[in-house]
C-alpha cells in the first residue's frame, strides 16, 4: 500500500513541478487527458472486466456508486446556485464528488485495511459501479453540462464513441474466452500508465493559489464525498436486507473514497471548471487517507 500511495503523491508532485519548470507545452495536460481517456482507461477496463467474476449477492454493493452519483446530481444542483456557484462549477462537483476513486486509491487502501479477501467486493464496486457510471451517465452529463450538442442523436454518437464504454462492451462479449498471454500483458502495461499519468495531469493543472475563494465549493464537494456519502450509504444498507459484515464495511469504505481522478479528467476535458476539478482531487486524496480509516474505526 505504501508503494502505491508513494506513486500517487510522486506523480502529483511531478506534475506540479513540470508546470513550474516551464519546459512543457501549455497543452501538455490536454494531450495526456486524451491519452488517458482513449488508451489507458479502455485498456484497464477491458482487462479488469474481462476477468471479473460477479456474485449475485454483490449487486447491491455494485449499485452504491450509482446512488452516490445520483444524489450528488440532486444535491449540487439544488445547493450550488444558492451558494453562488457557477453552472460549470456545479458540474465539476457532480463529476468529481459524484464519482469515487475506488480503484487507484480504493483497492490498495481497502486491501491494507481489511485484507486481500476484501478485494472481491471492492473490485465489483469499482468495475460495475464507478467505471460503468463514468462510462455512461457521467459521460452524458458532462456533454450536456458543457452545452455542446445535446440532441439525443449527438449524445448517442458520443456515448458509443466513448472508448472506455467500447472496451467495457468488448470485455463483456469476450468474457467466455481467455485472452492470449501477450494480449493480457499488453493491456496490463497500457492500463498501468493510467494512474501516474492522470495524477501527473492533475498536478500539472493544480494551482494551490486557487484555494482562495474556493473554500465554499471544496467544503461542499469534499464534505459530501468524504463524510455524507459513506454515512448515508451505511444508514441505507442498515435499513435494507443485511449484507455480511465484510461486504458492508467494504461498501461503506468505497463510498467514502476520494474523488475519482478520471472524473476530474472528464470534467477538464469538457472545460468544466478545470481548477476546481483539480483541487477536488489534489485536496481530496490526502484527506481520504484520514477519513477512510476513521470510517472503519467508527464501524468498530
Image: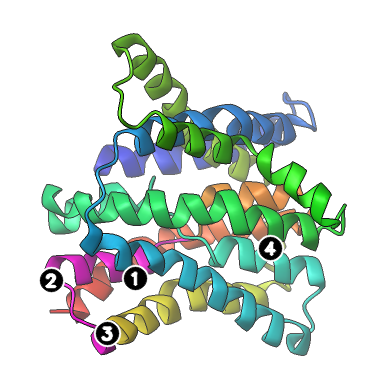
Q: Which range of residues does the magenta coloring cover? A: 238-258
Residue 33 at x, y percent in the picture:
66, 36
Q: Earlier in the sequence, mark 1 or mark 3?
A: 3
Name the disc covering residue 291, or none.
1
Report the magenta stretch's main SS: helix
| 2 vs 1, front mark | 2
Q: Quadrant of the C terminus?
A: bottom left
Q: CA distance from mark 1 to mark 3?
A: 25 Å
Q: At x 46% / y 22%, what residue is drawn?
A: 190
| 4 vs 1, front mark | 4
Dots 4 and 1: beta carbons under 8 Å? no
Q: Is residue 246 magenta?
A: yes
Query: Disc 2 on helix, strand or loop?
Result: loop
Name the disc covering residue 92, or none.
4
| 1 vs 3, front mark | 3
Q: CA distance from mark 2 to mark 4?
A: 35 Å
Depth check: 142 or 165 in front?
Answer: 165
Say whether residue 285 is left or right of residue 299: right
Total marks shown come to: 4
Q: Which residue is mark 2?
A: 244
Residue 269 at x, y percent in the picture:
73, 45
Name the disc covering residue 240, or none.
3
Picture quadrant where residue 91 is located: bottom right
Q: CA distance from mark 2 to mark 1?
A: 23 Å
Dots 3 and 2: beta carbons under 8 Å? no
Query: Disc 4 on helix, strand or loop?
Result: helix
Q: At x 80% / y 56%, what residue is drawn?
A: 152
Q: Earlier in the sequence, mark 2 or mark 4?
A: 4
Q: Residues within 10 Å of mark 1 (few under 14, many from 20)?
A: some
Query: Disc 1 on helix, strand or loop?
Result: helix
Depth check: 18 or 242 in front?
Answer: 242
Q: CA distance from mark 4 to mark 3?
A: 31 Å
Amino acid at each position: 500500500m505504501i508503494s502505491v500511495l508513494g506513486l500517487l503523491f510522486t506523480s502529483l508532485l511531478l506534475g506540479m513541478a513540470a508546470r513550474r519548470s516551464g519546459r512543457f507545452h501549455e497543452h501538455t495536460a490536454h494531450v495526456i487527458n486524451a491519452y488517458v481517456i482513449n488508451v489507458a482507461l479502455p485498456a484497464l477496463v477491458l482487462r479488469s472486466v474481462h476477468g471479473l467474476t460477479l456474485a449475485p449477492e454483490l449487486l447491491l454493493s455494485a449499485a452504491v456508486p450509482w446512488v452516490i452519483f445520483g444524489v450528488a446530481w440532486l444535491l449540487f444542483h439544488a445547493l450550488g446556485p444558492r451558494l453562488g456557484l457557477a453552472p460549470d462549477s456545479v458540474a465539476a462537483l457532480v463529476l468529481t464528488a459524484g464519482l469515487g476513486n475506488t480503484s487507484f486509491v480504493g483497492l490498495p487502501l481497502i486491501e491494507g485495511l481489511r485484507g486481500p479477501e476484501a478485494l472481491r467486493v471492492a473490485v465489483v464496486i469499482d468495475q460495475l459501479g464507478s467505471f460503468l457510471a463514468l462510462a455512461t451517465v457521467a459521460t452524458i452529463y458532462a456533454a450536456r453540462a458543457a452545452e455542446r450538442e445535446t440532441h439525443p442523436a449527438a449524445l448517442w454518437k458520443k456515448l458509443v464513441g466513448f472508448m472506455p464504454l467500447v472496451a467495457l462492451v468488448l470485455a463483456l462479449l469476450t468474457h467466455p474466452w481467455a485472452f492470449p498471454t501477450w494480449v493480457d500483458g499488453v493491456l496490463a502495461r497500457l492500463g498501468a500508465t493510467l494512474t501516474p499519468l492522470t495524477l501527473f495531469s492533475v498536478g500539472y493543472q493544480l494551482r494551490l493559489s486557487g484555494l482562495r475563494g474556493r473554500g465554499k465549493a471544496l467544503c461542499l464537494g469534499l464534505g459530501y464525498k468524504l463524510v455524507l456519502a459513506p454515512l448515508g450509504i451505511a444508514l441505507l444498507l442498515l435499513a435494507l436486507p443485511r449484507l455480511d459484515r465484510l461486504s458492508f464495511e467494504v461498501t461503506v469504505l468505497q463510498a467514502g473514497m476520494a474523488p475519482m481522478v478520471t472524473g476530474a479528467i472528464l470534467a477538464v476535458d469538457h472545460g468544466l471548471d478545470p481548477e476546481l476539478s483539480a483541487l477536488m482531487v489534489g485536496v481530496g486524496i490526502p484527506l481520504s487517507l484520514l477519513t477512510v480509516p476513521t470510517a472503519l474505526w467508527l464501524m468498530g
